[in-house]
Image: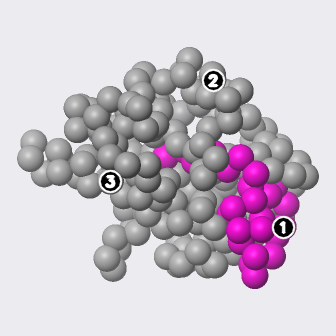
Amino acid sequence: MREFLIIGSKARTEKFSLNDLPGAGRIDILCRCVSSAFFLSHDIRRDVNVYLLLLGPPDPPKVLKIVGKEVKYMPPDERGIAGLIRKALEIKADKNWKKSTPGIYVAKKGLEELLDEVASDVYYLREDGEDIRKLKDNNALFVLGDHEGVPEELEEIVLRKAKKIIGIPTKSLMAEHCITIVHYELDRKQLNS
């Protein structure tokens, strides 16, 4: 199982306008990350889970969990994905996962609680990390931030929980591009083994 956790430092935690995704705390970035994590040409990755940690107003934190083997009716475009996120945020969230649509769940959890819950090894995806090509583990949760990175107080939690800091040795990349490259590198390893 390959998993991604994207931290939306200002992502809205209530219903937002589909006509202004950047103005909803950069929900557009999270939507592009979801698309990069799941979509192939004419198919979807069923062996992937994505967590979106929303830290914006008015009711943070909230987490959305998207389970690849269960998800249905998810279009690959930003607006379509944003519509599913918005629908999930209409649910009264508590500590337990509540199903919104097939494969999409919402809960009111913080970062540490979420990381304690996942079964995969945690890797922090950061610019100064060890080259991803050295990673041997395909069953992993990769933590990355949005356009602002991981907030300092949360980075301490990630560093405590992470097995290693992993990086993509290049220029600074957008989060959704990092996800695509992680898939590329790990897919190549699977094909060659």
- Which residue occupies 62% across, 28% down? 155
Which amino acid, mark 1? Lys
Q: Considering the image in quadrants, where does the N terminus appear?
A: top left
* Residues shaded magenta: 4-27
Task: Give residue 89's position: percent from left, percent from top.
Answer: 79, 61
* CA gap, disc 1 and disc 3: 31 Å
Marks counted in the figure total 3
* CA gap, disc 3 and disc 2: 25 Å
Q: Say what secondary structure mark 2 lies in.
A: helix
Q: Is residue 72 highlighted in magenta?
A: no
Residue highlighted by disc 2: 157
Find out whether the residues at labels 1 and 3 contact each other: C-beta distance under 8 Å: no
8, above or below 95, in the image: below
* In this picture, residue 125 sits left or right of residue 22: left
Residue 22 showing in the rendered view: yes
Q: Say what secondary structure mark 1 lies in.
A: loop
Which amino acid, mark 2? Ile
Residue highlighted by disc 1: 15
Which tag, 3 or 2, sits closer to the chain's start? Answer: 2
